Amino acid sequence: MVSLDSPITIIRPEIIEFGVGTAERLGKWASDKGYARILVISDAFNAARVEALGLKGEITVFADVTPEPDTANLDKVLAAANAADAQLVVGFGGGSAMDLAKLAAVLAGSSQSLRDVVGPNKVHGPRRVALAQVPTTAGTGSEAGIRALVTDPETMAKLAVESIHMLADIAVIDPSLTFTVPARTTAATGVDAMAHCVEAFTNRKAHPMIDLYAIEGTRLVGKYLARAVKDGTDAEARAGLALASLYGGFCLGPVNTAGGHALAYPLGTRWHIAHGAANALIFPHVLAFNTPSVPEKTRAVMDALGRKTSDDVQSVFDAAYGFCADLGIEMKLSALGVPDSDLDAMADDAFVIRRLLDNNPRDLTHADIRSIYEAAY
Ligand SMILES: NC(=O)c1ccc[n+]([C@@H]2O[C@H](COP(=O)([O-])OP(=O)(O)OC[C@H]3O[C@@H](n4cnc5c(N)ncnc54)[C@H](O)[C@@H]3O)[C@@H](O)[C@H]2O)c1
Ligand SMILES: [Fe+2]
C-alpha cells in the first residue's frame, strides 16, 4: 500500500475555468493567444451550438463523434484534422469528443499512428497545436487528464493512450452546458464520475494527496446526482456534478480506476452499453467484493453517498445497489440485451485488463469475475 511519503506526480491543465457562464471565455483566451484556425471536435448535439464558445476566426467543426468511439471514428477525425491544419484543437462534448480531440492534437500531421502510441508515454512531443477541452457531460473528467480511449472493433478492447502531450492548455467547465443532458445519461455519467473517485479511493495505489478529491467527489455525487436527474436545470446540482467529474479526472491521472472499470469495459466494447451505465451496473458488486480488503474506506464511501455504512458485504451491496437503482439505472445485465452465452467471453476480456485489475485492493480471479457477471445477470 501507498503512504503519505510515497512519490506521486500531479499534472493539471494550466488554466481551469469553472462555473456557470464560463463557456464563452474560451473565445477570449483563443483570441488573446492569436489562434485563428480552430478545429472543434464534437458530436452532433454539441456541434449545433458551437457558438456558445465565443470562438472567432476560421472555425472547422467536426460533428460526427460517436459515443464510445472506435478506430474508424478516430480515422475520420484525423482526416478532418489533417485538412484543417488548425492552431487550436477544441474538444467540445462528453468524454468521447474530448478523447478524440486529444488524439487529433497529437496525431494529426505526425508520423505516428494510433498503433504506435497505445500505452503510456509513447507519443513523441512536443505537440504542435494548442488544446482546449470543454466538457458537456459530467462524468469522465477527461478535460483534466492525459488519457484517451478508443475501441478496437477487431478485438473489442479499449485502446488506452496516455501521454503528457495530450494535456489540455485550458479546460473550460461550464455546468450550464450540461443542463440538456437527458436524465438517463445524467444518472449514468454521474455514476461514472463517482466510480472514478471510489475506485481511486479504494485502490491499491490510493494516495492521501488524491484521497481528498476522491472522497469529496463521491460526496458531491451523493448530494447532487439525484437532484440533477430530477431537474436538469438545477444549476447548483449541475455544478456539483461538474466538480465531481473534474475531481474524478484528478483521480484518474496518478491513481486510476480498478476492478469496477475493468469489469464494466466489456459491457461497452461488446454490447455497446453506455460507459456510465456499465459502471453503475458493476459498481455494487465490486464495492461489496472489495469490502473485506478495505473496510474503513468502504464505510467512508457509503457515508459520503449518504447511505448506511457497514462492513457487511451484503449490506454494502444492498446500499450501493439501491443508490444506483434509485437513480433509475437498469441494474440487470439480462435486461440490457446481453445473452448469458457471452458471460464467459466477457470474463475473458475483463481478466486481461491488467492495468486496472492490478490496482484492485482484492485480487479478482477469472472465476470471481465470471460469478460477478452471473450475479449481475
Ligand atoms: N479520458 C478519460 O480519462 C476517460 C474517462 C472516462 C471515460 N472516458 C471515455 O469517455 C467516453 C464516454 O463519454 P461520456 O460518458 O461523456 O459520453 P459521450 O461523450 O459518449 O456522450 C454521450 C451522449 O450524450 C450526448 N451529449 C453530450 N453532451 C450532451 C449535452 N450537454 N446535452 C445533450 N446530449 C449530450 C452525446 O451526443 C452522446 O450521444 C467513453 O468512450 C469512455 O471510454 C474517458
Ligand atoms: Fe469511466
Image (cartoon, grey):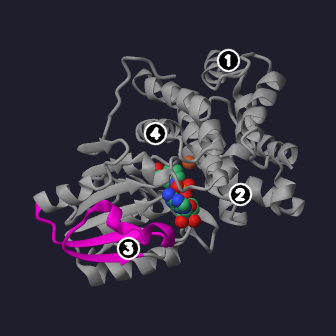
Question: Residue 285 got which mark?
Answer: none
Tell me the amino acid under the disc marked 1: Pro
In the rendered structure, which disc, 4 or 3, sits on the residue that comes first in sequence? 3
Q: What's the residue type where badge 4 is placed?
A: Ala
Q: The disc labelled 2 sits on which kind of residue? A: Leu
Where does the magenta region start and end? 33-62
> Which labelled disc corresponds to residue 113?
3
The residue mark sitting in front, 3 or 2, is 2
Between disc 1 and disc 4, the foreground one is 4
Along the viewing direction, whichever of 103 and 247 lies nearer the viewer? 247
For disc 4, does the CB lie below 8 Å from ligand 1? no
- Tell me the crowding category of disc 4: few under 14, some 14 to 19, or many 20 or more residues within 10 angstroms, Cα based: many
Name the residue tied to disc 1: 295
Q: CA distance from mark 1 to mark 4?
A: 30 Å
Answer left or right for 115 relative to 364: left
Mark 3 nearby-residue class (10 Å; few <14, some 14–19, many ≥20): some
Label 4's element? helix
Name the N-terminal-most of marks 4 and 2. 4
Q: Does residue 299 show up? A: yes
Q: Which residue is mark 2?
A: 267
Q: Which mark is residue 239?
A: 4
Cα gap from disc 3 to disc 1, whole angstroms: 44 Å
Q: Is residue 7 left or right of residue 184?
A: left
Q: Residue at coordinates 51% horizontally, 78% vertically from top-left?
A: 72
Real-space CA distance between mark 3 and mark 2, rounded to the nearest whole angstrom: 27 Å
Q: Residue at x 82, y 53 (%)?
A: 333
SS category of the residue bearing label 1: helix
The answer as to whether callout 1 falls within 8 Å of ligand 2 is no
Amino acid at dot 3: Ser
Give the image quarter of residue 47.
Answer: bottom left
